[in-house]
Amino acid sequence: MARADTLPAKPSSLLRFITCGSVDDGKSTLIGRLLYDCKGIFDDQLAALERDSKTSGTQAGAIDLALLTDGLAAEREQGITIDVAYRYFATEKRAFIVADTPGHEQYTRNMITGASTADLAVILIDARKGVLVQTRRHTYLVSLMGIRKVVLAVNKMDLVDYSQATFDQINNDYTAFAAQIGLEVVAIPLSSLKGDNVTACSERMPWYQGPALLAYLETVDIAVSGQSAPFRLCVQWVSRPDQNFRGFAGFVSSGEIRPGDRVRALPSGRESQVARIVTYDGDLAHAAAGESVTLTLTHEIDIGRGDVIAAADRPPMVADQFNTTVMWMSDADLLPGRPYLLKIGARTVSATVTAIKHKVNVNTLNHSAAKTLALNEIGVANIQVAHPIPFDAFSENKETGSFILIDRMSNDTVGAGLIQFALRRSQNVHWQAVEVNKPARSALKNQKACVLWFTGLSGAGKSTIANAVEKQLLALGRHTYLLDGDNVRHGLNRDLGFTDADRVENIRRVAEVAKLMTDAGLIVLVSFISPFRAERELARALFEPGEFLEIFIDVPLAEAEKRDPKGLYQRARRGEIANFTGISSAYEVPEAPDLRIDTTRGTAVDAADAILAKLRELELLTADF
């Protein structure tokens, strides 16, 4: 093994790998040993120590490995485990980038980040503990992320007296699990602290005849990702047009491209030819997977950020509904029907999980029915997006087949997903254009269609006020319909309970019904508790600007309990009703409602008058279009 001072300037190949495993399996010590023996990114630090050794009389070769591993531990104390720490080192045969990910279950998202660009995984196991649940979890996750080759590093062999029987038992247990998910495993017994089988074969384990870890990493054959796949460039930036240049910059995620090649832009489907491949250092005659370039085309076609430029004869599919595998990363459960943002490449679209098919037990690989996904759970789910997007199956292209889910309210990343295939109905079901539309139906009724969304605690007076508003609208000759929460649960939503997931679905269905009714030209009054801001925003997003009014019927919880017309609060306080809003389930107060009605001041008729005045102010009661 070559020392860093004898390495070539450009090693012949690059291997990206991830180290993972349970807490205290020795990941940092292993990385520290590799960096120390290869010098790597610690060259300057070691050079300084060597200079100090000349004056102190110590030998540089006697530097304690703890100096390096303690440095990694100090970083963890400073919170660097919140992200993935990437390390670089090299030998004369290969350069390496290693992703050091924390073993704690709450940092699963960091492990997924590290695995997303890795070619190989080093799974560490403490020889004293054997295969743990977190070991299986990380193994399953690396397989999901497309990694097929795994090094099983059975660490701390010095603490079990270098026992072959212990190693064999762990190897058998692990490979039996890995075989179920199609992983290729090479098992190596080692001691990161003592250096056994890390960079050189150890004499302490003569029964092991395989390579040391570094020798294996130097020689393992890893196919360059994406080279054999069809050409894909995800557009990240579009230059502003001028007289001489209009280019589309992005990362080539797969395939190769040359000037003159025919390409297709997705989702528009328009075709052109590559005129130039532009880089900072000049034009290229050829570009391949892994390179960032700017393409110019022979035709002026509309391409924007987030579009995909692809080989014309092998383009990606375009769809708006998918079967996916989702890894959930948020303390708040994933709820079907709740709106999220989905980011794939440089494109961000509104998305909804329409159904969770099942979740996976990472310890047994068994599937079980699920309505939600909790923190660190993995499931198979159907997802629908607001606009068709270009994609490939993740097994064919990681870049165009993976996505993240973002919470619309906090902007936090809450999940990561892999697209398996488009749902058939997304290809077969198309919007049917009709000639009689909403403006025509509204004109016939001499009114503007809109939805009045009443939200508030149980007992606030939503239904009473909505009923009073509808009576006044009827007296004015307006065409209306009132959707009341209790009434709808007798029919359309009779199958739903009161869990958070069921509440989300309850509001989703009602919002879709209200949309159909406004399309019919009606003024729709919706009286639902609708406790979550995200679902109220989902409802608003279904309508055109100015068509949706959120009316917050505001009452203090104590006052609502005092009224308690149905005796529900008393039952909830006694524990007889689960998931009751305001008691055992949260109500998220509207931050900026279109109208706030304080029902502790005035009557229902007063409230109705105020709402009618607001409608006149917004010109929603005029027949002028």
Image: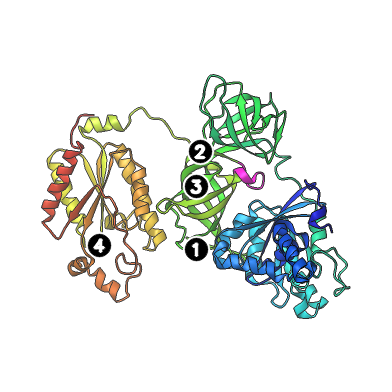
Q: Name the residue carrying label 3.
A: 342
Q: Determine whether 242 is above or below 33 in the image.
A: above
**Separation of residues labelled 2 and 4 (CA atoms):** 39 Å
**Separation of residues labelled 1 and 2 (CA atoms):** 28 Å
Q: Which of marks 1 and 2 is nearer the N terminus?
A: 1
Q: Marks 1 and 3: in contact by CB < 8 Å?
A: no
**Separation of residues labelled 3 and 2 (CA atoms):** 12 Å
Q: Name the residue carrying label 2.
A: 388
Tag 2 secondary structure: strand
Q: Where is residue 450 in the image (x, y as percent from the top left)?
A: 26, 40
Neighbours of disc 4 within 10 Å: few (<14), some (14-19), many (20+) = many
Tag 4 secondary structure: loop
Tag 3 secondary structure: strand
Q: Residue at x 31, y 64 (%)?
A: 581
Q: Where is residue 100 in the image (x, y as percent from the top left)?
A: 65, 61
Can the viewer see residue 176 in this picture? Answer: no
In the displayed orientation, state which residue is furthest to the front. 55
**Separation of residues labelled 3 and 4 (CA atoms):** 33 Å
